[in-house]
Amino acid sequence: MSTLKKMEILKSYIETKGLKSTAQRDYIAEVFFKTNTHISLEELLKKVKRKTPAIGYATVYRTMKLLTECGLAIARQFGDGQTRYENLPEHGHHDHIICIKCSKILEFQNEKIEHLQSETAKKLGFTVISHKLELYGYCAGCA
């Protein structure tokens, strides 16, 4: 989904919530939509402050809350006590493998794992609505 389409969805959501569209909020969203990593609020704040130093942490926090509420961002916890945000995956569902030493986060897709999860849920009588798989360990550089 293009940044322009995401901005349209955000503007529509903001209107339905009775909020005002602001240049700061739009800029934060644009910077986030161009990000292809799992970014923390602090990292995003640092990026937006390069061009707009007046933007504060609370504005970034509220913007990311809106993006999460309207489905344009996913909030993730990877065991380090910090919330990271990711754009909606363009290639559908994916899982994560996380280095517990350097915090490197890699995404992967594996159809066999997805099939086994579905098969297991079916055998146990579950209807899966969503799921996430996170593997923790050491990357090759930290092992």
Image (spheres, helix red, strand yellow):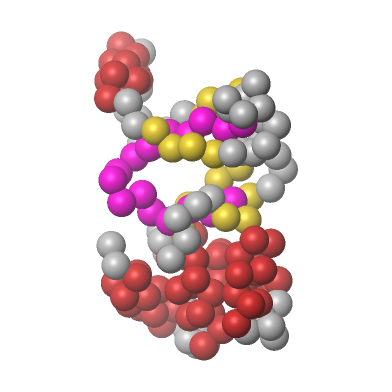
Residue found 56% across the figure and 64% down from its top? 65
- The vertical placement of 108 against 23, above or below, is above
Q: Is residue 33 left or right of residue 57?
A: left
Q: Is residue 138 above or below residue 80?
A: above
Q: Nearer the viewer, residue 10 or 44?
A: 44
Q: Nearer the viewer, residue 9 or 31?
A: 31
Q: Position of residue 40 (x, y in %)?
A: 63, 56
Quarter of the picture holding the N terminus: bottom left
Query: As displayed, is residue 114 above or below residue 72?
Result: above
Is-magenta flag for residue 35?
no
Do we see residue 35 in this rendering? Answer: yes
Magenta-drawn stretch contains 97: yes
Q: Position of residue 50 (x, y in %)?
A: 63, 77
Residue 36 placement: quadrant: bottom left
Tell me if residue 13 can be seen. no
> Percent position (x, y) of residue 132?
45, 33
Give the residue at x 70% y 71%: 57
In the rendered image, residue 85, in percent from the top left (x then y), is placed at: 54, 54
Magenta-highlighted residues? 84-99
Q: State the quadrant of the C terminus.
A: top right
Q: Residue at x 50, y 52 (%)?
A: 37
Q: Residue at x 34, y 40 (%)?
A: 93
Residue 77 in the figure: left or right of residue 113: right
